[in-house]
Image (tube, rainbow, N blue to C red):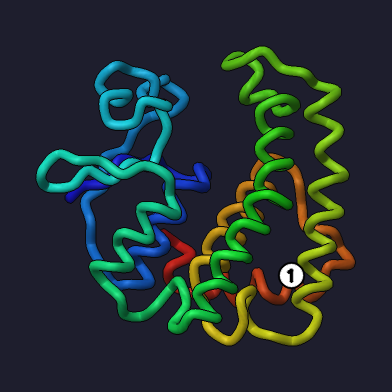
Amino acid sequence: MKLYGEANPAPNPRRVRMFLAEKGVDLPEIRVALRKGEHKTAEHKARNSLGQVPVLELDDGQTISESVAICRYLEALHPTPPMFGSCALTQAQVDMWVRRIEFQIMSPVAMYWRHAHPLTASLLAQNNDFGESNKPIVGKSMLWLDRELADGRPWIAGEAYGMADIVALTTIDFAGFIGLEVPDEASALKAWRDRASARPSAAA
């Protein structure tokens, strides 16, 4: 198997690298230069018709796209330590939190990135007012997550570090890269980020 991805700060390829690091699995990664448009070439679109990364290519040539789907596949091959929960309840909680993070935080972060950030201005037609309108939504969503974490649990889905934390850390780090910082008053969220960032996998 081999992974097609991109260097940081691209958040979705980083999710898979962090997941692999937590599993202790070494998988070769071929970098696809997004700023050079390599993800939109016919060669890469043969792997993923949407022209996105990451993509996992299996030994028989079949491919899997979407970071969480890739990690689900790898979880089945390498179940220890469990990153998607260890029972029906915790598995459902991880799935719930992954979707919450993607919809409540990653979605407005992505809209700000696409429509208001100067690095994307040459890549697509921007609607700057719409992009800027997502900035307060990101802050509000981060404060929502801060309140959720204020109950003292160590990780987003409960007692065990897992996929929800990976999705959240890559999202929040990317938000910071594009200028959308965690609000000063979000002390629980900041403490969680410090714990997550201290794990060796965060450097992936």
Residue 150 percent coordinates (x, y): 80, 80
The residue depicted at 43 percent of the width and 50 percent of the height is: 67
Instruction: Tell me if residue 136 comes above or below residue 149 in the rendering.
Output: above
Residue 154 percent coordinates (x, y): 64, 84
Q: Quadrant of residue 51?
A: top left
Instruction: Tell me if residue 142 comes above or below residue 1 in the rendering.
Output: below
Left or right, 62 with respect to 34, comes to: left
Instruction: Tell me if residue 35 comes above or below residue 80 in the rendering.
Output: above
Secondary structure category for the residue under label 1: helix
Number of labelled discs? 1
Left or right, 167 with respect to 6, comes to: right
Instruction: Tell me if residue 54 comes above or below residue 19 in the rendering.
Output: above
Front residue of 20/83: it is: 83
Quadrant (top left/top right/bottom left/bottom right) for the C terminus: bottom left
Q: Residue extending furthest left?
A: 60
Q: Amino acid at mark 1?
A: Lys
Residue 170 percent coordinates (x, y): 56, 55
Q: Is residue 176 visible?
A: no
Near mark 1 (Cα within 10 A), the count class, few <14, some 14-19 or many ≥20, is some
Residue 133 percent coordinates (x, y): 86, 33
Q: Is residue 47 visible?
A: yes
The residue depicted at 62 percent of the width and 23 percent of the height is: 120
Q: Quadrant of residue 115?
A: top right
Q: Which residue is mark 1?
A: 190
Front residue of 12/157: it is: 157
The residue depicted at 70 percent of the width and 33 percent of the height is: 111
The residue depicted at 68 percent of the width and 49 percent of the height is: 103
Left or right, 144 with respect to 50, comes to: right
